[in-house]
Image (cartoon, grey):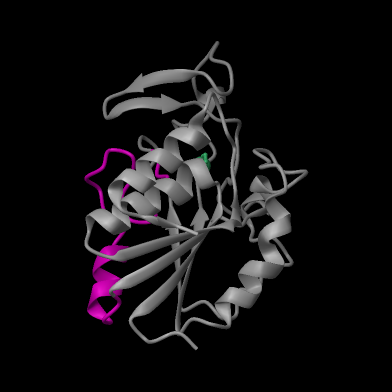
Amino acid sequence: MRPANQALIVIDIQNDFCPGGALAVAGGDEIIPMVNALMEEFQIVVLTQDWHPEDHSSFAASHPGAAPFSLIEMPYGPQVLWPVHCVQGSGGAAFHPALRTDPAHLVIRKGFRPQIDSYSAFYENDRVTPTGLDGWLKNIGVTAVTVVGLATDYCVAYSALDAVSHGFTTTVIEAACRAIDLNGSLAEARAQMRDAGVRLV
Ligand code: VGL
Ligand code: ZN
C-alpha cells in the first residue's frame, strides 16, 4: 500500500474514449486491468469524468460549418473542436463497464460549463476556473499524485502539468495511458511534461 500522502488520479475512462465510442482513443480499453490493479495500491483514488451539455462549445456540431478536429479561437485561446462526446447522462459519458469505480473516493466532473472546455482535472481550459481538486487534495494531506487514463496528450497531460505547477510531486504511468495523437500532440505533451518536472514512467 502506498502512503496516505499519495493519490491516484484516473482520467476519463469513459465509453466515448474507448473503442466504439464517439471520440475513441486507440487501445483505450487496454489500460483498464492495469488501472483497476493500481487503484488497490492507493489510499486515495480520484476519478474524473468528462461531462458536457449536449450543445457544448467544444463540439464541432455547435459551430456551423466547422469540421471535427479543426481549431477555433475561443476567448481563452485556441480550442480543438471535437466530435460530440461525453454528453451528460449518455451511455458514452458512463465509465467503461470494466473500470472498477467502487475504490474511488471522489469523482470530479468537468467540462460542464457550456462556454469553456476542461481537459485538466484541476482547471478548465481558460486556466483560471478551478474544479476544486487542488484544494480537496491539499485539505486531506496529499502531496504526490500519479496520473493515468485517457488521453495522454490532452486530459492526462493537462492534469499532470497543473498538478506539478501546484506543488504536487507528479508521476504519469505511460503504460496506463493511451493518446489521441493529433498533429504531433503526443510528442509535444511528453516534452512539456518532462520540461515541467513530471516523472514519466
Ligand atoms: C478529452 C478531448 C476532449 C480527454 C476530453 O479526455 O483527453 N479530450 N475531451
Ligand atoms: Zn471533452
Quarter residue 4 falls in: bottom left
Apparent side of residue 33 relative to residue 149 in the rendered image (left or right) = right
Q: Does residue 54 appear in the picture of this structure?
A: yes
Q: Is residue 88 above or below residue 179?
A: below
Q: Work out which residue is located at the far top of the displayed protein and give it.
A: 65
Quarter residue 33 falls in: bottom right
Residue 49 % position (x, y): 52, 57
Magenta stretch, residue numbers: 117-142
For the stretch drawn in magenta, the main secondary structure is loop
Residue 41 % position (x, y): 54, 82
Residue 193 % position (x, y): 37, 46
Query: Residue at horizontal 56%, vertical 77%?
Result: 39
Q: Work out which residue is located at the far right of the displayed protein and give it.
A: 20
Residue 136 in magenta? yes
Q: Does residue 55 appear in the picture of this structure?
A: no
Apparent side of residue 121 relative to residue 151 in the rendered image (left or right) = left
Query: Residue at horizontal 36%, vertical 40%?
Result: 192
User: Which is nearer the eye, 120 or 88?
Assistant: 120
Q: Is residue 113 above or below residue 61?
A: below
Residue 62 % position (x, y): 51, 25
Query: Residue at horizontal 64%, vertical 38%?
Result: 23
Residue 125 in magenta? yes
Number of marks in the image? 0
Apparent side of residue 139 relative to residue 107 in the rendered image (left or right) = left
Q: Is residue 8 above or below residue 60?
A: below
Query: Residue at horizontal 33%, vertical 71%?
Result: 144
